[in-house]
Image: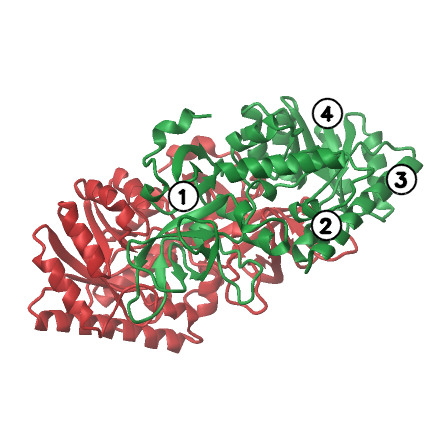
Chain colours: A red, B green
Amino acid sequence: MNAGNTAIHAPDLFGLRTPALILDLDVLENNLRVMQERADALGVRLRPHVKTHKCVEIAELQRSRGTSGITVSTLAEARVFAEAGFADILWAFPLNLSRIDEAAALSRRVELGVTVDSLTAVEALEAAGTAFSVWLEIDCGYGRSGVPYDSGRVVEIARQISRAGRLALGGCLTHAGHTYGADSPAAVAALAEEERRAMVEVARALRAAELEPGVLSLGSTPGMSRVETLEGIDEVRPGNYALHDYTQTRLGSCAVGDCAVTVLATVVSAREGVGGAIADCGALALSKDPGPDDPPHYGRLFGSPEGGHLGDDRVTSVSQEHGHLSGRYRVGEKVRVLPNHACLTVAHFDHFEVARGHRVVDRWKIRRIRD
Amino acid sequence: MNAGNTAIHAPDLFGLRTPALILDLDVLENNLRVMQERADALGVRLRPHVKTHKCVEIAELQRSRGTSGITVSTLAEARVFAEAGFADILWAFPLNLSRIDEAAALSRRVELGVTVDSLTAVEALEAAGTAFSVWLEIDCGYGRSGVPYDSGRVVEIARQISRAGRLALGGCLTHAGHTYGADSPAAVAALAEEERRAMVEVARALRAAELEPGVLSLGSTPGMSRVETLEGIDEVRPGNYALHDYTQTRLGSCAVGDCAVTVLATVVSAREGVGGAIADCGALALSKDPGPDDPPHYGRLFGSPEGGHLGDDRVTSVSQEHGHLSGRYRVGEKVRVLPNHACLTVAHFDHFEVARGHRVVDRWKIRRIRD
């Protein structure tokens, strides 16, 4: 795991050049342990979504703690992780017909699940003439992609898959992304239970039509933090839980101390007499995700760069490289920002600076390829 | 320029795997010509900001048409372009004290301008013991970084630079970023004129204090589209003009036909009976820039994928890889999206797919390094 050590340019966190994406290894390890224990207690396999971290080292830590396969959002991610030795990969994004040839090539090397929610996609897979493990996406109420769980199209599409000689129904998956809009932990728990029941209903409908549903897969990080039973479900696919972020703290999924990534930035302009300060944590560090607060901001500052607790200050606006901080700071001062949305923040960096406390112990590559 | 040709995997635009970032070469070339002619007519040098495209090939096209140096927003960008043969680089971001050693190393290889707006930064540069070309950032009213143009600190900081043996005042720069908030072309023109007058006032104050201001540099793409005179100014630094985007069309800086980059996406879920569709143009393709419209959206769809005119549909919401389209589409259908903010969209891709009309003629690397 220490192969990247030569790239460490400062043994102490506060000696790093900024902006830097700090990964707190103790916090990460705790998050991985907690979710694995939760999945074990609920009697389901854990297939983490690696779009959150896009990092082979983190996926290896997840695997070493007991996960079962991984989830990806793009074929580029799938290829990176396949090359790194992950052989059970679910591409949990509706099939992009412009990439069937690539999916076919990867399906010959690893166990790749491809996702569909239409007859059109099934027919395109049939026409490709390759064996595919096909997963049917279900909409449990989020309203993004997927076949509504109570629609007759669930059976219709599953039947089409089962009739195609080279296709096999690998499973049914859903994602209750509307847990992110819930206004209380109780509301999250209710949506997570609806997600479970929707999938149980899907399985019942398929079996009534003499179709085998395969793996029943669901999950979001907020839902996994609150769900009380996963009876009838086989696996879960949270992603954000490995890192957590400010949005998760507001949803009640975790505490501030469970957030594993922060952006270390340097104050570059103190705006004497004008108010606020500018640091090198703009839209290409934090992302423009406006987060859960009103008025919106782009991240919360820690009360001190050592971390531990949030202060009152926020990144109130961002341009490409400039982040505007509320509060008074000195030029050259280091600040640490808790991002609203870890997944998007990570996707703006090439590396995690991996730390235990203040000590930088490694540098891990973020595979943010868009190919 | 055709060295990347081997990577072209489809000669026709609509055969490309998606999401793909399409660069219309005819439009780009026209944009470069128009701005160069405008700078020439206004009697100023053009030092384009390459943070917009992060692409050596585009910077080479700009140079071949008469630009004079480049502007960058990070040292990583500066290094990439220095290695590609650009020898006159202005780092137009307030000096990050954690990167002085890197700036010193690069200053020994190329003409690098570093930017300051505080005595603290000047003192840190003095202490580094290297020769630096130091540019003083002026706030002409935008209220981001920079010394207010009418503050006594302009002379104070310039004098500190001039007294330091190894430092030279390379110039004074400002950016009227508040042109992006203007509500009419007349308001843009008024702000651009204020920007010019602020810099003329800065030069007058410095000369009255027997200090030589060096190069007087300003500019934004909206301002450059409207400013009537740049008397007293030496150079301009617009960046977005090379590509333009939906925001610029709304500001009146350009027409839809002047926008050189679009995202080609594939509909992956048709949401039968629910309304709208999902395509592979989420936050990691378009960015989460909400753009200028109310209600906000993440991009406007062309009326047909061939381009030319905008239709009524929008990308109404984005998650990491999902873009939610208004309107009805078929699974597998290709759509073209005009992004709100070209700079942030470009920063999510590894390549431009370079096209003339529908023909893909090259693939240019986007140097989105964060190091």
- As drawn, the label of residue A368 is 1
Asked if marks 3 and 1 fall on the same chain, the answer is no
Residue visible at 26% across and 50% down in the picture: A97
Give, as a three-letter code, the residue at label 2.
Answer: Ala
Q: Tell me the subunit letter for badge 4.
A: B
Q: Indicate whether B267 appears above or below A109.
A: below
For marks 2 and 1, the one nearer the N-term is 2
Percent x, y of residue B1 = 47, 25
Give, as a three-letter code, the residue at label 4.
Answer: Ala
Tag 2 residue: A270
The 10 Å Cα crowd at callout 3, few under 14, some 14 to 19, many 20 or more, is some
Residue visible at 86% across and 40% down in the picture: B155
Percent x, y of residue B319 = 41, 59
Give left or right: position of A247 versus A154.
right
Secondary structure under tag 2 reads loop
Between circles 2 and 1, the one closer to the viewer is 1
Secondary structure under tag 4 reads loop
In space, the residues marked 1 and 4 are separated at their CA atoms by 37 Å
